[in-house]
């Protein structure tokens, strides 16, 4: 009898990937590292496409979730964080060092199209160049910006001037060339309610159809990563995640940082605090989804509809519950490294009754949303078979959350890479198969019902918890100083999808590198493939179905 325990999924993944590496890409591997979340391969900068395509095709690592760029004293690095859509616990990082004086690496965009924007950001903020990139230019800062803000030699006192050519008419050359053009450039935003924030869409129209669309980002880039790098792990970073997503999903965002920091320093969260986190995160998710559904009714109907008003009413009720729990209505700052700030308010019975009273009405309210929207013939006409996102395209652009699940991709980190109390509860992953605008609305409405189920089960657990065992925080040192050169990438299922955090420690109480993986950033990159060939109203409906939050995109 074999008394050895069976290998874990992570161990099997390691063996599988190791076999692929040894057999097919071993000659390109310079070294290996161990990050806290996964193994890492160090490869030559001229072999990026070969290594990544092999890992995608042979090892099944088909999800490029994030690309992190950073500078050391002696080199630059690009880190490609790979996962599997079938099992996100199957992880591997590919580290690509480049010389200090010549930071040029091969682009991965030909293998993973989502890498195009990530590499543009790496060029923009850090200064790494990517050979054979399809469109290597700045993405968050103006083209005329001097220097790279996250490079070690960046001078923040250097004056910046946006020249006149930044405001030149992009159609001028088309009309003054000898050839007649049948296309027209239509600027949508950056100040327009249909863009869901400060987003600029450069739409090229051929007649009334969209021939091309280019999202223009960076209008509210606020240096969030740099601010986190200047803040302490223990107290100063946690208030920032709330501000990435102003739809109300801040607690989900807080959890992304908490998970990364806790795994970085081996902090175990008390079980009672995990239940509180799960309940509050799902209430926060409901805030975001109500706003998404309500504003989407505005996008496709164009007036303050009953669905929008109902969504605002439901948001108010959820916000009141979260205000009672956290003391805040939007910027909650409820989670702490090691737990949560405090227990449910006293009297507990009254708080539980308030939450239950709200949950009891959720099924009826959701049926009203279906009557107003999904059963509405006009709404169906605007959303069915428009903005179609093929599952293969969704994976190529790293789409996650309701956007991916609306294309039939059953990927949810709450179930597939469990954290909190999710694996102890009874709930389902909402998916839809058609991949159109209508499907993404269906998924969000179903997720509202599932979140209500999760919250109700958390209430039952909290009510029965012995008073003497209600520990809301672990015993965490006042100052956290992870070991030097410790690296980790951790993600949670936020309201929009996979929200990930990469941290590299240098032995101090502040991160040496702090990278935010925004799901909306990847979703917007997929917009052209969804909108080309459709009409302008379809473009607006498609953009709204992605539920982008520009504070999270621009960071």
Image (spheres, rainbow, N blue to C red):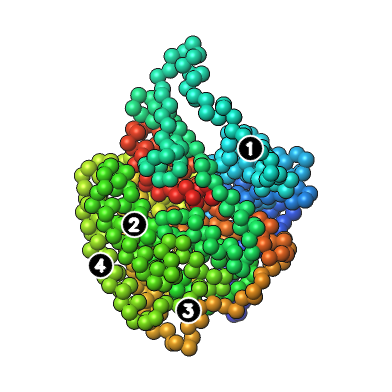
Residue at mark 1: 160
**Up-down: is 324 above or below 107?**
below
Q: Which numbered tag is attached to residue 272?
A: 3
Q: Residues within 10 Å of mark 3 (few under 14, many from 20)?
A: many
Residue at mark 4: 361
Q: CA distance from mark 4 to mark 3?
A: 27 Å
Q: Residues within 10 Å of mark 2 (few under 14, many from 20)?
A: many
Residue at mark 2: 290
**Of callouts 2 and 1, the N-terminal one:** 1
Closest to the observer, 71 or 236 = 236
Q: Which of label 3 and label 2 is nearer to you?
A: 2
Asked if the residue under mark 1 is in contact with the one under mark 3, i.e. CB atoms within 8 Å, the reply is no
Left-right relation of 555 to 298: right
In which quadrant is the N terminus drawn? bottom right
Q: Position of residue 442 (x, y in %)?
A: 31, 53
At x 31% / y 41%, what residue is drawn? 385
Asked if the residue under mark 1 is in contact with the one under mark 2, i.e. CB atoms within 8 Å, the reply is no
**Of callouts 4 and 3, the N-terminal one:** 3
Closest to the observer, 416 or 211 = 211
Quadrant of the rendered image containing residue 161? top right
Q: Secondary structure at mark 3?
A: helix
Q: Residues within 10 Å of mark 1 (few under 14, many from 20)?
A: few
């Amino acid at each position: 009898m074999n008394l050895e325990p069976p290998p874990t999924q992570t161990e099997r993944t390691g063996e599988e990937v190791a076999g692929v590496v040894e057999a097919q890409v071993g000659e390109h591997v310079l070294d290996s590292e161990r990050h806290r979340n996964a193994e890492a391969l160090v490869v030559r900068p001229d072999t990026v496409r070969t290594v990544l395509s092999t890992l995608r095709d042979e090892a099944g690592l088909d999800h490029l979730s994030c690309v992190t760029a950073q500078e050391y004293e002696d080199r630059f690095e690009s880190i490609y964080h790979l996962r599997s859509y079938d099992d996100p616990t199957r992880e591997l990082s590919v580290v690509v060092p480049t010389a200090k004086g010549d930071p040029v690496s091969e682009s991965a965009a030909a293998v993973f199209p989502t890498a195009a924007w990530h590499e543009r950001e790496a060029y923009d903020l850090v200064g790494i160049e990517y050979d054979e990139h399809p469109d290597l230019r700045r993405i968050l800062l103006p083209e005329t910006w001097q220097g790279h803000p996250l490079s070690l030699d960046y001078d923040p006192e250097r004056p910046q001037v946006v020249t006149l050519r930044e405001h030149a008419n992009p159609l001028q050359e088309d009309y003054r060339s000898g050839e007649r053009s049948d296309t027209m450039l239509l600027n949508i935003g950056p100040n327009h309610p249909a863009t869901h924030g400060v987003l600029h869409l450069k739409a090229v129209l051929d007649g009334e159809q969209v021939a091309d669309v280019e999202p223009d980002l960076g209008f509210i880039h606020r240096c969030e990563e740099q601010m986190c790098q200047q803040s302490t792990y223990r107290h100063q970073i946690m208030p920032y995640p709330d501000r990435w997503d102003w739809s109300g999903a801040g607690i989900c965002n807080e959890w992304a940082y908490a998970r990364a920091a806790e795994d970085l320093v081996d902090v175990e969260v008390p079980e009672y605090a995990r239940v509180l986190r799960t309940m509050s995160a799902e209430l926060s998710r409901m805030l975001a989804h109500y706003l998404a559904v309500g504003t989407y009714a505005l996008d496709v109907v164009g007036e303050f509809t009953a669905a929008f008003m109902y969504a605002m009413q439901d948001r108010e009720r959820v916000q009141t519950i979260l205000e009672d729990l956290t003391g805040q209505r939007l910027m909650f700052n409820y989670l702490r490294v090691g737990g949560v700030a405090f227990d449910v308010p006293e009297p507990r019975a009254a708080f539980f009754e308030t939450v239950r009273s709200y949950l009891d009405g959720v099924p009826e309210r959701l049926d009203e949303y279906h009557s107003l929207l999904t059963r509405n013939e006009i709404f169906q006409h605007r959303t069915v078979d428009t903005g179609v996102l093929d599952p293969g395209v969704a994976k190529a652009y790293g789409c996650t959350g309701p956007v991916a699940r609306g294309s039939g991709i059953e990927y949810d980190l709450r179930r597939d890479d469990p954290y909190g109390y999710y694996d102890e509860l009874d709930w389902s992953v909402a998916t839809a198969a058609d991949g159109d605008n209508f499907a993404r609305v269906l998924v969000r409405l179903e997720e509202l019902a599932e979140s209500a189920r999760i919250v109700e089960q958390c209430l039952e657990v909290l009510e029965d918890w012995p008073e003497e065992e209600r520990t809301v925080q672990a015993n965490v040192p006042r100052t956290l100083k992870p070991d030097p050169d410790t690296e980790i990438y951790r993600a949670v299922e936020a309201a929009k999808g996979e929200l990930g955090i990469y941290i590299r420690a240098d032995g101090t109480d502040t991160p040496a590198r702090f990278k935010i993986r925004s799901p909306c950033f990847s979703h917007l990159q997929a917009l052209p493939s969804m909108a080309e060939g459709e009409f302008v109203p379809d473009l607006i409906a498609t953009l709204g179905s992605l539920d982008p939050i520009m504070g999270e995109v621009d960071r």
